[in-house]
């Protein structure tokens, strides 16, 4: 746990943070004219109260992070400059004070830099290596992360003085001595002066207010007040043009906007995006403009982030909570994969291993992204997670499942792209199955027998003997079936299947073998839709050639071996089975994520010096930008890997 303090000009915030989450916080009045030590001592008293309320003590914390205004030497933990606030802090030994008063290790940083570190580790800056953050409040602070490093410069001012960039040279007097700085033209402290000096002020609805902040300016502008509209126009112009200069200077991938103005982020972000689109001159990719995730407590997250010794690791192997689905044909075969199944009346039929659908989401269970859903991750970084060119609004392209067919699944069909054009709300679904385990007489049905016409098939759909018209195979472990969309199919009873499919949930049931549910009702059939799929299917089915070129095998012992079997390759996914004993060096190459499933034994996945255990029966996702990873297997292991490119 980290104790945090964000020293402000009007209020000081303090809190306790653990694993990137603020677990308690408070606010007290700032005392910028008091000696810094007096103020800090009283804030520490409040922190001690917070600790007591949480059943702990301050001395048990792992460190104390403090953010201060002014330039800060973040190596020696000294404040270098002040501006009429806590003026004695330049002569104050924060480190020695912290040791004596709290016994804790101290880290000190400038508030704008701290806020950016907080957003980088825990908020809107995650997954990015080139970031700029501007905090617009009473003053204006900026900070920059360039190529994964916090910019500090020769004198700890690097990227920090964006509030004093000239946006209106010769304009209003700034506290720094210059005329026309962004801070003098468009900060909280400038706002009051600018409004009061405006020629329309005495006719303005703002003149009756006790205090005027950004919120009031925006509200009155919205209501049509001419003075407010005029000042707002000036502020938006100044802010937008400053951002363009920052883009030209620092070339960030993403700009995070924080501070008091983010009370109405949509209008603000839209205005900034327009100005940037008009003036930005780098060419190439657009800069993303986003709101801070924690605008009110950015400083406390930031102070906690000072203790994150490493760069945030965003592209690590992701493990998810399985989503279990009941089905009348389900059973308990998944228990053989050491799964604890939900206690439900209807047995468990499926485990959705990786899913990103409007009604279901995989949630991360490990690392920095713990608790985040796959959708949230893709929104944060579509190309880093899924692969090149992926649109953040588009779902994850695949759905991965384990299917426990204790009983026969229905006879069914899924549409392809072409037949979807004739079916309302349909999503195409090509899938493949890998038989993990099966009962002795288990069968798989895939495709209608040659020579059976549509009419012959249709005339039999109400008869459970329709199965006699299907191509039927005896199940065998490790066998793969490629079920192209518009192929009639059924998984027979006694099969445990790993399924890789297009992200779709459109199934047309043709026959349920005369089965009824516990209340005696049959499940709905969709014979007409199924026939539409068959009629409109696109006959073209070109295999997509590919090679497994990213892998290098390193034997570890005499009995080591390695083999690759290509299981499926189509426009939607490529799936291979590795047989492995030894070490396999593989690489996600930015075009596609990889998923890994451990078929018969636990595996070790090594990535950037960290080791992850992929247990037998578990799936993990290697993000597209994860780069190199190693799979280590001590025994004859089988691994199913899927990807989209
Ligand atoms: Zn200035």
Image (cartoon, rainbow, N blue to C red):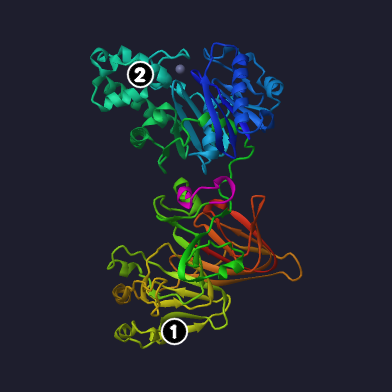
| Element under disc 1 | strand
Question: Which residue of the protein is positioned furthest toward the right in this rendering?
Answer: 558
What is the C-alpha distance between the residues marked 1 and 2? 76 Å
Q: Is residue 449 visible?
A: no
**Magenta run includes residue 371:** yes
Q: Which residue is mark 1?
A: 471
Q: Residue 225 at x, y = what percent?
A: 24, 22
Which image quadrant is residue 113 in?
top right
Q: Residue 39 at x, y = what percent?
A: 59, 16
Residue at image point 34% right, 27% down: 236
Which sits in the foreground, 243 or 87? 87
Which sits in the foreground, 453 or 209? 209
Q: Is residue 339 left or right of residue 125?
A: right
Residue at image point 52% right, 57% down: 593
Which sits in the foreground, 272 or 21? 21
Q: Residue 614 at x, y = what percent?
A: 62, 59
Q: Which of disc 2 and disc 1 is earlier in sequence? A: 2
Mark seen at residue 212: 2
Disc 2 packing (10 Å; few <14; some 14–19; many ≥20): some
Q: Residue 92 at x, y = what percent?
A: 65, 16
**Magenta run includes residue 463:** no
Where does the magenta region start and end? 364-377
Disc 1 packing (10 Å; few <14; some 14–19; many ≥20): some
Quarter of the N terminus within the rendering: top right
Which image quadrant is residue 199 in?
top left
The answer to whether 147 is drawn above or below residue 49 in the figure is below
């Amino acid at each position: 746990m980290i104790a945090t303090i964000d020293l402000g000009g009007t209020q000081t915030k303090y809190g306790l943070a653990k694993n990137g989450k603020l677990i308690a916080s408070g606010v007290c009045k700032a005392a910028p004219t008091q000696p810094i030590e007096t103020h800090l001592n009283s804030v520490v008293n409040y922190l001690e109260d917070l600790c007591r309320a949480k059943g702990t003590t301050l001395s048990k914390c792992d460190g104390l992070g403090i953010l201060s205004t002014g330039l800060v030497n973040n190596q020696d933990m000294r404040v270098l400059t002040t501006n009429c606030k806590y003026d004695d802090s330049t002569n104050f030994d924060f480190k020695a004070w912290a040791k004596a008063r709290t016994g804790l290790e101290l880290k000190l940083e400038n508030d704008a830099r701290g806020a950016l570190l907080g957003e980088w580790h825990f908020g809107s800056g995650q997954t990015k290596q080139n970031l700029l953050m501007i905090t617009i409040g009473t003053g204006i602070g900026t900070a920059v992360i360039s190529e994964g490093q916090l910019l500090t410069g020769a004198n700890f001012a690097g990227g920090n003085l964006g509030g004093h960039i000239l946006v209106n040279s010769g304009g209003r007097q700034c506290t720094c001595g210059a005329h026309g700085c962004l801070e003098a033209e468009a900060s909280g402290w400038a706002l009051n002066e600018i409004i009061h000096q405006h020629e329309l002020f005495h006719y303005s609805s703002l003149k009756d207010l006790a205090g005027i902040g950004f919120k009031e300016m925006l509200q009155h502008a919205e209501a049509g007040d001419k003075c407010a509209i005029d000042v707002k126009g000036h502020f938006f112009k100044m802010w937008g043009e400053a951002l363009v200069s920052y883009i030209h200077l620092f070339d960030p991938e993403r700009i995070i906007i924080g501070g008091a103005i983010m009370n109405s982020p949509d209008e603000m972000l839209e205005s900034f995006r327009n100005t940037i689109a008009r003036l930005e001159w780098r060419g190439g990719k657009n800069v993303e403009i986003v709101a801070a995730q924690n605008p009110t407590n950015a400083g406390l997250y930031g102070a906690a982030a000072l203790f994150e010794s490493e760069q945030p690791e965003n592209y690590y192997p992701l493990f998810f909570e399985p989503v279990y689905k009941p089905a009348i044909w389900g059973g308990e075969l998944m228990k053989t994969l050491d799964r604890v199944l939900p206690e439900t009346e209807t047995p468990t039929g499926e485990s959705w291993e990786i899913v990103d659908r409007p009604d279901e989401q995989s949630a991360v269970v490990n690392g920095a992204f713990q608790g985040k859903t796959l959708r949230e991750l893709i929104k944060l970084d579509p190309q880093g997670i899924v692969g090149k060119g992926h649109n953040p609004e588009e779902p994850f392209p695949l759905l991965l499942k384990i299917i426990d067919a204790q009983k026969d699944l229905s006879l069914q069909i899924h549409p392809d792209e072409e037949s979807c054009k004739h079916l309302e709300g349909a999503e195409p679904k090509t899938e493949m199955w890998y038989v993990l385990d099966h009962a002795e007489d288990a069968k798989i049905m895939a495709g209608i027998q040659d020579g059976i016409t549509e009419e012959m098939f249709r005339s039999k759909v109400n008869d459970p003997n329709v199965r006699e018209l299907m191509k039927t195979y005896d199940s065998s472990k490790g066998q793969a079936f490629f079920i192209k969309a518009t192929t009639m199919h059924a998984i027979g009873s006694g099969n445990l299947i790993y399924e890789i499919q297009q992200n779709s949930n459109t199934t047309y049931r043709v026959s349920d073998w005369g089965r009824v549910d516990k209340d005696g009702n049959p499940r709905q059939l969709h014979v007409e839709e199924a026939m539409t799929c068959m009629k409109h299917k696109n006959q073209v089915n070109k295999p997509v050639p590919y090679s497994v070129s990213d892998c290098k095998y390193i034997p570890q012992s005499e009995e080591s071996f390695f083999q690759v079997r290509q299981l499926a390759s189509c426009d939607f996914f490529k799936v291979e089975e590795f047989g492995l004993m030894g070490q396999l060096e593989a690489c996600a190459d930015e075009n596609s994520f990889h998923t890994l499933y451990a078929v018969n034994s636990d595996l070790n996945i090594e990535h950037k010096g960290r080791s992850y255990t992929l247990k037998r029966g578990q799936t993990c996702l290697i993000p597209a930008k994860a780069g190199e990873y190693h799979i280590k297997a001590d025994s004859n292991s089988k691994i199913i890997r899927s990807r989209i490119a």
